[in-house]
Amino acid sequence: MNVHARFVNLIESLDSFKELTPTEYFLINKLISMWDKKAQVTVNEVLMIKGLGSRAKLHRDLMSLKDKGFIGHESDEDDQRVKYVVAKKKLEQFILGHEKAFRLSLK
């Protein structure tokens, strides 16, 4: 079995992966990528992501991720209308699970 197949199999075995829809999984990965480039990501910036459906669909997916405990929202100190998407402990554990799966897939 190749490295990528091992990685995918390990990821699919994670409990946190099983509770996500494919769109939510992609959205989480997109958020991680956005956070890597920019410390704070607004809800509006997430709603502008192309290829995942309408703004309304993205908003529903964000709310679902929030309800599942992966993300939260924090208001900007200067402008309460601006909301930032923040990672919660469950998402941090999800990322650690991915990192562990990646390392194991290389063995």
Image: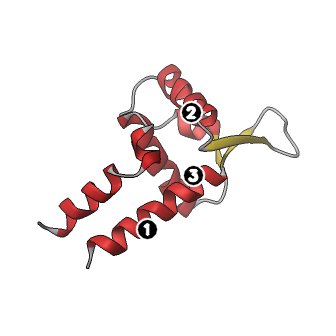
Residue sitting farthest toward the right: 78
Determine the residue positioned at 56% across, 26% down: 59
Crowding near the residue tagged with mark 1, few <14, some 14–19, many ≥20 C-alpha atoms within 10 Å: some
Secondary structure under the numbered disc 1 in the rendered image: helix
In x, y percent, where is residue 40? 67, 53
Residue sitting farthest toward the top: 56
In this rendering, would 99 be left or right of 13? Answer: right
Q: Amino acid at mark 2?
A: Leu
Crowding near the residue tagged with mark 3, few <14, some 14–19, many ≥20 C-alpha atoms within 10 Å: some
Q: Is residue 86 above or below residue 4?
A: above
Mark 1, residue position:
99
In this rendering, would 41 be left or right of 25? Answer: right
Q: Is residue 13 above or below residue 105?
A: above
Crowding near the residue tagged with mark 2, few <14, some 14–19, many ≥20 C-alpha atoms within 10 Å: many
Determine the residue positioned at 60% across, 59% down: 38
Residue sitting farthest toward the left: 1
In x, y percent, where is residue 49? 46, 38
Q: Amino acid at mark 1?
A: Glu
Mark 3, residue position:
91
Secondary structure under the numbered disc 2 in the rendered image: helix
Instruction: Tell which of 83 and 27 is nearer to you.
Output: 27
Determine the residue positioned at 57% across, 52% down: 91
Mark 2 vs mark 1: give the one in front: 1
Determine contact: label 3, label 2, CB under 8 Å: no
Determine the residue positioned at 56% across, 36% down: 65
Mark 2, residue position:
62
Q: Amino acid at mark 3?
A: Leu
Mark sitting earlier along the chain (2/1): 2
Quick one: quadrant of the N terminus? bottom left
Q: Is residue 15 above or below residue 43?
A: below
